[in-house]
Structure formats: C-alpha cells, structure tokens
Amino acid sequence: MVEQEQIRENLSRVQERITAAAQRAGRRGEEITLIGVSKTHPAEAIRAAYESGLRHFGENRVQEWEGKRAALADLNATWHLVGHLQSNKAARAAGLFHSVDSIDDSGVAQRLQRARGEVTGSPKLRVLLEVRVEEEESKNGVKIEEAGALAEKVAALSHIELVGLMCIPPFLEDVEKVRPYFCRLREVRDSLVREIGRDLPVLSMGMSHDFEVAIEEGATEVRVGAAIFGSRPVK
C-alpha cells in the first residue's frame, strides 16, 4: 500500500506535468480534469488522495466499487465508471456513479436510462461514448463509423447527458506513436458535433504513461492510476 505522503507527492508531480503539458498546447492546467483511477486500490488509498486534493476517481468494475463505497460515503467526490459496463450491471451502475465514461452500446444506454429514471429527483447521468480508435476487434468501444448513430440515440435519452468521448489507445512505449490515436478521437468528436448538432466538450484520453501527449492533442480529462497510487496490489 502506498503511504499518504507518497500519494501526496505523486499527485503533486502529476499535476505539475499536467500544467506543463497544457502550457505547451497554449492551454491552462485548470482546463484538465484529473481522474485518479483507483481500481484494485483500497479505500484508504482513495481517502489519502482525496485528502491530498484529488476530487475525481475512476473505478473499473461495479462490484469492486460497491465494496469500497460505504467506507468513502462521507467524501464529496465525483465517481466515474471508466471500465467496460456489462448490460446486466447497468442498472446498478446508474445508482452508483456520477458518470459512466465507457458507453459503447445503445442497449446499455437504454438500461441506464430506465434505472436513472426510477430514482426520483435524480439528476441526469453524465456519460461518454467509448470509441474504438484502433482496428483490433477484441477492443471495447463503438467503431468510428458507427459512433454517429450511437451518439444520436444516446443524446435523445431524457435521463442521460452525453457530454463527450473517451478512448483507450494501444499501449506503446514510444508515446509519440500514441499521438495519432488521440488526434483521431478529437477529429471524431469534431465530426460528431457537426453531425448531431450539439456540443461534446469532453475528451477523456491519456493515462499514466501518455497523458501529456493526450493533453497536447486536446484531452479535457486524463485517467491516471499508477502515477498516483503506485503499482496495482498483487492479488
């Protein structure tokens, strides 16, 4: 487990890198939302990051977050589901997260819509479409050529608020080789804005090893795990 002081130092270092990358792109560091990806890390590590100033957290699995949630119920944080959402867990996710950042199927979106609608007085559920920016069929995400049709369907849902796109590019040691994937997501977003006639301000892209390049290519949210929390605990 990473000690609180180490998490604080890690977080400060990441924020400095975000600011520097934003400046290189002629942007302000405050424009970038840092999401701490806390999957497999215990509730104590999340609390340590919160106490160090982090306010957005990403979990990959519904069941794992259910196991941590009670211990963190007092935190005024924003909880993102950043992992693939199975349709049979969509109803639970609708009540557990402030944002589902990995929609790639209209059926899942419909389930989120129904579940969110059943919660009286609940605000719209913020969602992002996950777009497959590489050709590999085994990857999650809607195909680029099908993103417009999905965006139209999701944007029409009354209890869902579609605000942007996310992607998970291939892991490449040379981050410059990842840059074209981030550029592609930005271009897809710009095309969708014209196609569906609504603003999509959020681009969630970039992780611990490549978030600086993502920011240079327009990321508004970066999902950083290891650079904040350290290596994932061995199961």
Image (spheres, grey):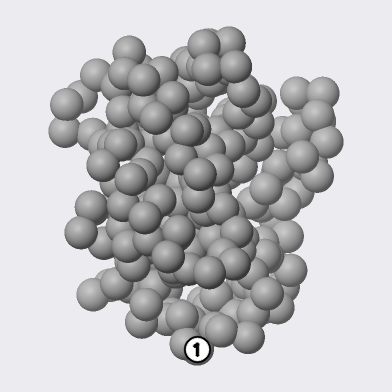
User: Given the image, on which type of amino acid does mark 1 rest?
Assistant: Ala
Residue 67 at x, y = what percent? 36, 82
Residue 186 at x, y = what percent? 55, 20
* Residue drawn at (47%, 87%) of the image: 70
Numbered disc total: 1
Residue 134 at x, y = what percent? 30, 21
Q: Is 226 in front, or is 134?
A: 134
- Is label 1 in a helix, a strand or a loop? helix
Q: Is residue 199 left or right of residue 112?
A: right
Quadrant in the picture for residue 121: bottom right
Q: Is residue 169 left or right of residue 49?
A: left
Q: Is residue 57 visible?
A: no
Q: Is residue 78 visible?
A: yes
Q: Is 127 in front, or is 216?
A: 127
Pick the quarter of the image with the N terminus. Answer: bottom left
Q: Is residue 78 left or right of residue 20?
A: left
Q: Is 120 in front, or is 22?
A: 120
- In the rendered view, would you say 145 is above or below 199? above
Pick the quarter of the image with the C terminus. Answer: bottom left
Q: Check disc 1 and report the residue beneath it.
A: 71
Q: Residues within 10 Å of mark 1 (few under 14, many from 20)?
A: few
* Residue drawn at (68%, 65%) of the image: 54
- In the rendered view, would you say 201 is above or below 68? above
* Residue drawn at (71%, 42%) of the image: 32
